[in-house]
């Protein structure tokens, strides 16, 4: 799911954030909501990338295992079922 911080409807949400941290952050931004939205958008993009990477690794592992199985069969093939 791709997100666009500028094209979607905005709504108020409740967050529980460390009060001292909020006070410190306000010294660096006059729009805390925009800053949080930007940071959250970066987080989502980073996590989406990480998820795609994990899926690529899992797909490669499955492809390798399937190649091994196709080349040599399964250990279980040599044993009859009970």
Image (cartoon, grey):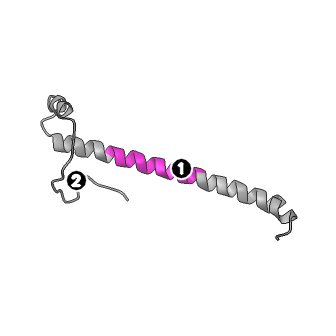
Label 1, secondary structure: give it. Answer: helix
Q: Is residue 74 visible?
A: no
Question: Do tag 1 and tag 2 residues touch (Cβ < 8 Å)?
Answer: no
Residue 78 shown in magenta? no
Q: Nearer the viewer, mark 1 or mark 2?
A: 1
Give the magenta-colored segment's residue range: 42-57
Q: Alpha-carbon distance for marks 1 and 2? A: 29 Å
Most common SS among magenta residues? helix
* Labelled disc at residue 54: 1
Residue at figure coordinates x 15%, y 54% from the top left: 12
**Residue holding disc 2:** 6
Q: Which residue is at the far front?
A: 82
Q: Quadrant of residue 79?
A: bottom right
Residue at figure coordinates x 17%, y 34% from the top left: 19
Residue at figure coordinates x 21%, y 35% from the top left: 18
Q: Answer few, some or many: residues within 10 Å of disc 1's Cα (few below 14, many 20 plus, some between 14 and 19).
A: few
Could you tell me residue 40's position as x and y percent? Answer: 29, 45
Q: Answer few, some or many: residues within 10 Å of disc 2's Cα (few below 14, many 20 plus, some between 14 and 19).
A: few
Up/down of 30 relative to 70, above or below: above
Query: Which quadrant: the C terminus?
Result: bottom right
Could you tell me residue 20's position as x and y percent? Answer: 18, 30
N-terminal of the pair, mark 1 or mark 2, is 2
């Amino acid at each position: 799911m791709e997100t666009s911080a500028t094209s979607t409807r905005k709504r108020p949400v409740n967050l529980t954030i460390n009060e001292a941290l909020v006070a410190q952050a306000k010294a660096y931004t006059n729009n805390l909501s925009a800053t949080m939205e930007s940071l959250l958008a970066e987080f989502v993009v980073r996590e989406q990338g990480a998820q795609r990477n994990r899926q690529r690794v899992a797909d490669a592992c499955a492809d390798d295992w399937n190649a091994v199985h196709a080349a040599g069969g399964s250990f279980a093939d040599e044993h009859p079922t009970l």
